[in-house]
Image: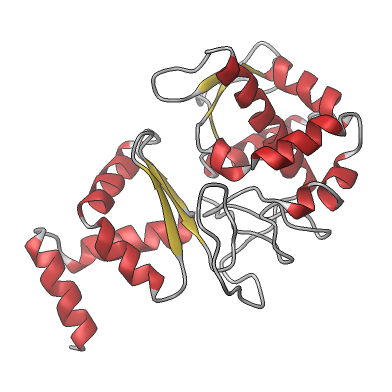
Amino acid sequence: MSTLQAVLFEKLTAENLRESDWLELLQRLLDYGVLCRAESQVEAELYDRYVRIESLVDDYLALMGVRLHHDSRFQYVRLVPPGARVPGVDDETDTPFNGGFRAKLNQNEVALILCLRTEYDKALREGQVDEGGCVNLSIEALALSLKNLLSRSLPESQQERKLLFKRLRQLRVIRFGAEADLGDGESWIKVRPMIVNLVSNEVIDSLIADAGEMVDDVVESSVKEEEIEASLAAATDKGSLFGDESSAELEES
């Protein structure tokens, strides 16, 4: 057993945790990129385990240049891959050459995330946020926002629309029930507070100023200069919503 393993085992034993508990937590973080306590019983248990050994996990991942953004108020933690720049998190002084942990978002996903952040800000100003920091938003309102801001529409195909919303749910940006009819404008979703850490204020200001432009123009110009998060995210082939030249991280669950 190496010195590092010995120290790790000692720390885990002190918290009454096994090596299998450690592996399960690390594998989930690296695979999903995010833990949200309110998502499920499994994630609640893993999040609580993370809180118990937060400094140990942070120090371990720091050896690989990976950071974690932990919001204790809304009880979620998101993995920030090397080189990603996230609103509210200090930038690294050195950035890697390539993407590493990151996975790209397509333009529909980018557009929807931008509109979700805009609608979240609007609800926040109006005091329409629940105790968990979430905002209720109808599909109809989201479709209208998408049309007004980016001159785009939600996918007509029910399958494509379902996959799009499923992707954002995997990123813990939104939440909706299994019974939700995403083709019905009167159906509702919840926008989670971590959307604030995915898209900077500068991006939203630029988006509103350029309302009516196609998302391709937004991504290539204003959005390219800033970022959408961590654990979180990449943009299109033309630029990154995180603000670096390569695509940013957004792990799928």
Farthest bottom residue? 2
Taking 209 as reference, is 102 left or right? left
Residue at x 52%, y 13% (from the top left corner): 127
Q: Is residue 188 visible?
A: no
Q: Is residue 97 above or below residue 17?
A: below
Q: Quadrant of residue 43?
A: top left
| Residue drawn where x is 74% and y is 29% of the image | 158
Q: Is residue 250 left or right of residue 244?
A: left
Image coordinates of residue 137 in percent, x first then y, are 61, 18
Provide residue 26's location: percent of width, then percent of height.
Answer: 35, 63
Image location of residue 58, percent across then percent down: 34, 63
Q: Position of residue 213 (x, y in %)?
A: 91, 35
Quarter the N terminus occupies: bottom left
Look at the image and tell me whether residue 221 can be seen: yes
Give the residue drawn at x 30%, y 37%: 41
Residue at the image point whose x is 46% and y is 67% from the top:
66
Q: Please state which of residues 182 and 82 is positioned toward the viewer in this rendering.
A: 82
Q: Left of 220 or right of it: where is 139?
A: left
- Residue 22 lies, with reference to residue 48, above or below; the image says below
For residue 212, side relative to residue 200 (left or right): right
Residue 139 vertical placement versus 170 (above, below): above
Instruction: Kindly indicate the quadrant of the structure image that contains residue 76.
Output: top left
Identify whether 212 is placed above or below 171. above
Q: Nearer the viewer, residue 133 or 16?
A: 133
Query: What's the colour scheme?
Result: secondary structure
